Image (tube, grey):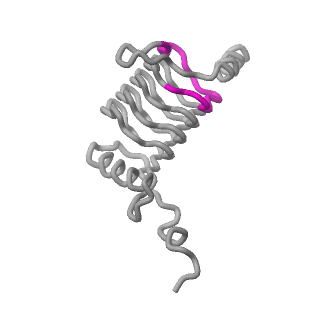
Amino acid sequence: MSIFPEFITRDRPPQSVLIRRRVSERQLNRLLRRHALYRTGARDGRRAVLLRCDLSGLDLKGVDLSGADILECDFSGADLSGAQLQNATLAGCRFENSRLDAADLSGADLSRSDFENADLRGADLGEATLCGARLGGAELGESPQTGLTTNIDTRQLDRLMMQLKRQ
């Protein structure tokens, strides 16, 4: 009999990892189900971890990957409208020409991510880390779908502008 409570000893760390692959819809659905269980604290739940995966062009509307670790993945041309990505680690990801209309990226780590020509209208970037992020050509402002405006900390914008001036 263990002296530790079950929630400390079961499957540490709880993760479901995909590395360097083109993610199929089937794999993604399985990963999302296990991540949803993880977020509720269910025994067989696993936190989603994606490393250098290709998710380009996928329909990811309303996906919930809050708190997931997603590093150096390619979301180019993907539709992430209404996606829940708060407090996720999305460092080094490519979101070129992606649709993030009304996506919740609050508290996310978006360091070194590329949002070239991405649609960020209505997205919530409050308290997101944007160190080294590229927002060239990104659409900010009011979402035509929800009427929400892009929420971004002006201090973050100031830092991005200073980085551009140094380059």
Quick check: 17 above or below 104?
Answer: below
Q: Is residue 151 above or below residue 144?
A: below
Q: Quadrant of the C terminus?
A: top right
Residue sitting farthest toward the bottom = 1
In the shown orientation, is residue 56 left or right of residue 128?
Answer: left
- How many labels, in total? 0
Lateral position of residue 129 relative to residue 26, left or right:
right
Identity of the residue drawn at 57% across and 76% down: 4
Q: Main secondary structure of the magenta part?
A: loop
Whether residue 39 sits left or right of residue 155 in the image: it is: left
- In the picture, measured across the screen, residue 18 lies left or right of residue 162, that is left
Q: Locate residue 160: give its quadrant.
A: top right
Based on the picture, tell me whether residue 137 belongs to the magenta stretch: yes
Q: Image point 44% across, 28% down: which residue?
A: 103
The image shows residue 117, relative to residue 128, as above or below, that is above
On the image, the x and y values in percent for residue 148 come to: 45, 18
Q: Nearer the viewer, residue 72 or 5?
A: 5
Whole-percent x and y of residue 152?
Answer: 58, 22
Q: Which residues are magenta?
A: 124-141
Name the residue nearer the viewer: 134 or 4. 4
Percent position (x, y) of residue 80? 38, 30
Q: Residue at x 54, y 74 (%)?
A: 5
Q: Is residue 106 magenta?
A: no
At a point 38% along the width and 63% down the height, the residue shown is 44
